[in-house]
Amino acid sequence: MSWQSYVDDHLMCDIDGHHLAAAAIIGHDGSVWAQSSSFPQFKPQEITAIMNDFNEPGSLAPTGLHLGGTKYMVIQGEAGAVIRGKKGSGGITVKKTNQALIFGTYEEPLTPGQCNIIVERLGDYLVEQDLHLLSIETWMPAKDHCKKVDLADDNTSNKQKHN
């Protein structure tokens, strides 16, 4: 199983005919582990700024989160663990794990909450499994989140923790 399979099968999974606009797993050093074909070409300083916000929460708020030249307004998040951003009818969720950042971007009809669930569940699983001690072949997160996300449930966008 490759990192690309986790992007393709877990982050870009189909939810009632819809999916994230783009997704990636990127090392803390900015190296691309895997990405969807639609993931934007980013600049190293954009990843550095995101990492800085995890270390100093709120540092992106004045300037916004930039990825591939797109500026997202930073909204609710979890200090040191999750950064969320909004741009028009879409947005971004970034989840920090021990060694990587999990990225997901969305556009309507996907909701912010659905993006959060998809990205954060995979990230939470990696954190729980202590990624830095495991090889990729030793874990396999369930794809249940692809079946359980209800497109009509906008209340998920305000949830901070997920089952």
Image (cartoon, rainbow, N blue to C red):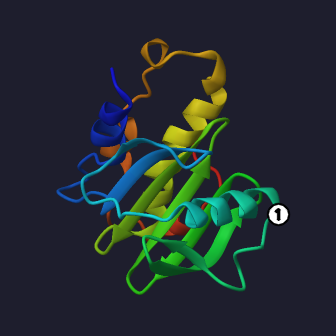
Q: Residue furthest left?
A: 17
The total number of labels drawn is: 1
Horizontal side, residue 154 vs residue 19: left or right: right
- Residue drawn at (51%, 15%) of the image: 135
State whether residue 147 is above or below residue 57. Answer: above
State whether residue 98 is above or below residue 162. Answer: above
Q: Residue furthest top?
A: 138
In the depicted view, which residue is nearer to us: 44 or 83? 44
User: Which quarter of the rendering shows the N terminus?
Assistant: top left
- Where is residue 71 drawn, in percent x and y? 50, 81
Q: Is residue 95 in sight in this rendering?
A: yes
- Residue drawn at (55%, 57%) of the image: 94
Q: Is residue 150 in sight in this rendering?
A: no
Badge 1 element: loop
Query: For residue 97, what is the image quadrant?
Result: top right
Q: Residue furthest right?
A: 56
- Where is residue 26 drawn, in percent x and y? 50, 46
Q: Which residue type carries mark 1?
A: Glu
User: Which quarter of the rendering shows the C terminus?
Assistant: top right
In the depicted view, which residue is nearer to us: 20 or 159? 20
State whether residue 42 is above or below residue 145. Answer: below
- Where is residue 106 drawn, in percent x and y? 36, 67
Horizontal side, residue 132 vs residue 152: left or right: right
In the depicted view, which residue is nearer to us: 24 or 41? 41
Label 1, on which residue?
Answer: 56
- Where is residue 98 drawn, in percent x and y? 67, 35
Horizontal side, residue 90 vs residue 12: left or right: right
Query: For residue 150, what is the image quadrant?
Result: bottom left
**Tag 1: Cα neighbours inside 10 Å, few (<14), some, or many (≥20)?**
few
- Residue drawn at (34%, 25%) of the image: 2
- Residue drawn at (66%, 84%) of the image: 63
